[in-house]
Image (cartoon, grey):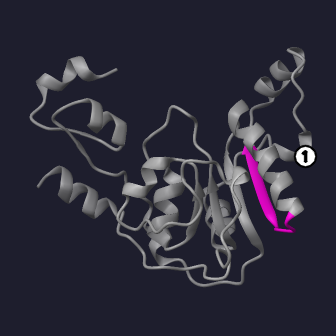
Amino acid sequence: DYRDKVPFFDKTYSFDYLDCEQNAGIEYVPTFYSGEFARLPRVDQEYDFLFYGNFTDERYENMLKFKSFTDKHQYILKTHLFISRSRYILHLLKGLKIKRKFISFRKMTKDEYITLFNKSRVIVDITTQSQSGMAMRVTDALGAGNRILNCNRYITREPNYTKGADPDTCPHKHPIPDGFLEDRKFKKYDYSIDLWLSRIFR
């Protein structure tokens, strides 16, 4: 909680919509992406969906549900959830079961992520219930002009949002709209660090 520090600054910004709603004087500025995503070449797609991130119990459970959904509808899903060996062992000692084939003890490099990202038709981002700011996966996708399935209802406020799946429900609870996978690309939105800096120092 940084609110006690706000009076010491001339301007205060947040990439979290809820921060801005609940605290007068805090302006919304979305975070920035890496420039590579704006310059990705077109390649043949190998996967319908990419589900990527660090392991959390909530994300893992939602990934399993989404896996059942994609299997049922014969979609090709690529997953990569990173978990440290110590945390994995801790889960086992607590009696919590984690399917080994769905997690990885190795962090994916940035180049590996970009390659998978570019080979995937849709990026899946399932946020935690407490998160209202846009995750990096969202800005990467919107900046690349790539499709994203997301359960953060605040995404509807982003300039490049067009209605697809209901953002108030996670993807595995809602049918994928007809034609959603057919058109991979749309107009890119600028989430560059140059634009971010110009907003901060304007």
Residue at x 85% of width, y 15% of height: 94
Residue at x 51% of width, y 31% of height: 130
Q: Is 76 covered by the magenta stretch?
A: yes
Q: Is residue 171 left or right of residue 139?
A: right
Against 145, residue 10 (above or below) is above
- Amino acid on which disc 1 is placed: Lys
Residue at x 67% of width, y 54% of height: 171
Asked whether 123 or 91 is in front, the reply is 123
Task: Give the image location of residue 96, x and y in percent.
Answer: 86, 23
Asked whether 197 or 150 is in front, the reply is 150
Task: Give the image location of residue 170, x and y in percent.
Answer: 64, 48
Task: Give the image location of residue 22, x and y in percent.
Answer: 28, 30
- Give the magenta part as a residue range: 73-81
Q: Is residue 143 left or right of residue 81?
A: left
Total marks in image = 1
Against 26, residue 161 (above or below) is below
